[in-house]
Amino acid sequence: MVGFPAVRMRRLRENATLRDMLTEVTLEPRHLILPLFVCPGEGLANPIPSMPGVFHWSVDRLPEVVEPAIARGVRSFLFFGLPSYKDHEGSAAFDLEQPVQRALRLLRENYRDIFLIADTCMCEYTTHGHCGHLTEDGRVDNDQTLELLSRAAVSQARAGAHMVAPSDMMDGRVGAIRAALDFEGLSDTGIMSYAAKQASAFYGPFRDAASCAPAFGDRRGYQLPPMNPREIIRDALMDVDEGADILIVKPAGPYLDIAARLRAKTNLPMTGYVVSGEYMMLQTAITAGALDRARGLLEYHAAVRRAGCDLVITYFATELAGLL
């Protein structure tokens, strides 16, 4: 008789109600975070060529993308900014009149019950495209960068961010930002750390979208090496010790093993980021007719949840919420 209960359960799952009752992992609109690119100017919704279906939004037109997402149950938004100016230090990152800060103020004042996250990094704001302060010989100065990141995080929190998300991958950044926020009386602002951000090939379209490709070299000196899972977990747990509130695994799909390993090491909430390269990979397969759109998107994002992530950052958030 061994195996008969399993056969019986397979037959019973033909009943849709029981199938739903027994679902172990769910993907719901409340699990989704929508990334948005905001830019200077007014009346703008400019298509991003490298990411069809994604736009650069001027702050005044944000309701056109935020309200449909809210109507479908998406409640959280992650902001990246194209500044009106760039310099060597990336000072626009902590300018209260730049697009990210203006977007945070607008949404915080006009929409209740949503959650606002600001990406905290320097690469979008520097003329050289690297994620921090450069020394004279072209190296990123870790400790000097911590000061810049802290100023940016404080500016974003003052503008209305519920949470800041440092994506730079400098050592000690979470502790430095936590200390700066607390010193400024912003202790209620959370930190969603890009704790496991790999030096990945899947970021190409984003670097075009955010105009943040390095002017020289690459970021492998401070992002994590994909073939070193023990090092990745060790670095992520350092962020836990420094006071991170939520951890991000990025990219999500190619690093589900990292998400699963990290889930076994910490009880902190975790987020998987389905990045621009994954977005385009799925879009290309769908356009070619090789992937059923609805089933493919649901299955791909459910895998991120199944690996142990509580939340999913995805450019498909509004569409997925509609499917769900």
Image: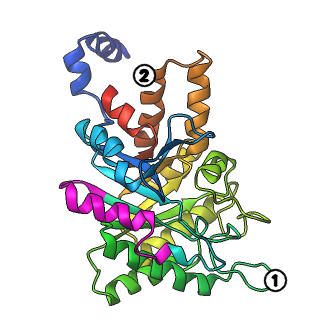
Does residue 189 show up magenta in the picture? no
Magenta-drawn segment: 93-115
SS type, badge 1: loop
- The image shows residue 85, relative to residue 133, as above or below, that is above
- Residue at 46% x, 57% y: name it: 41
Callout 2–callout 1 Cβ contact below 8 Å = no
Cα distance between the residues tagged 2 and 1: 50 Å
Q: So how many labels did they put on this image?
A: 2
Q: Position of residue 186 (x, y in %)?
A: 29, 80
Question: Which residue occupies the foreground of this view, 132 or 303?
Answer: 132
- The image shows residue 30, relative to residue 243, as above or below, that is above
SS type, badge 2: helix
Question: Which residue occupies the foreground of this view, 211 or 266?
Answer: 211
- Residue at 50% x, 40% y: name it: 54
Q: Is residue 60 left or right of residue 278?
A: left
- Residue at 69% x, 58% y: name it: 213
Residue type (three-letter) at the residue carrying disc 2: Ala
Q: Is residue 100 visible?
A: yes
- Residue at 31% x, 34% y: name it: 24
Does residue 101 show up magenta in the picture? yes
Question: Which residue is denoted by mark 1 in the rendering?
Answer: 137
Neighbour tally class for label 2: few under 14, some 14-19, many 20 plus, Cα within 10 Å: few
Residue type (three-letter) at the residue carrying disc 1: Asp
The quarter of the image holding the N terminus is: top left
Looking at marks 2 and 1 on the same chain, the residue that comes earlier in the sequence is marked by: 1
- The image shows residue 130, relative to residue 225, as above or below, that is below
Q: Position of residue 278 (x, y in %)?
A: 58, 39
- The image shows residue 290, relative to residue 53, as above or below, that is above
Q: Is residue 308 visible?
A: no
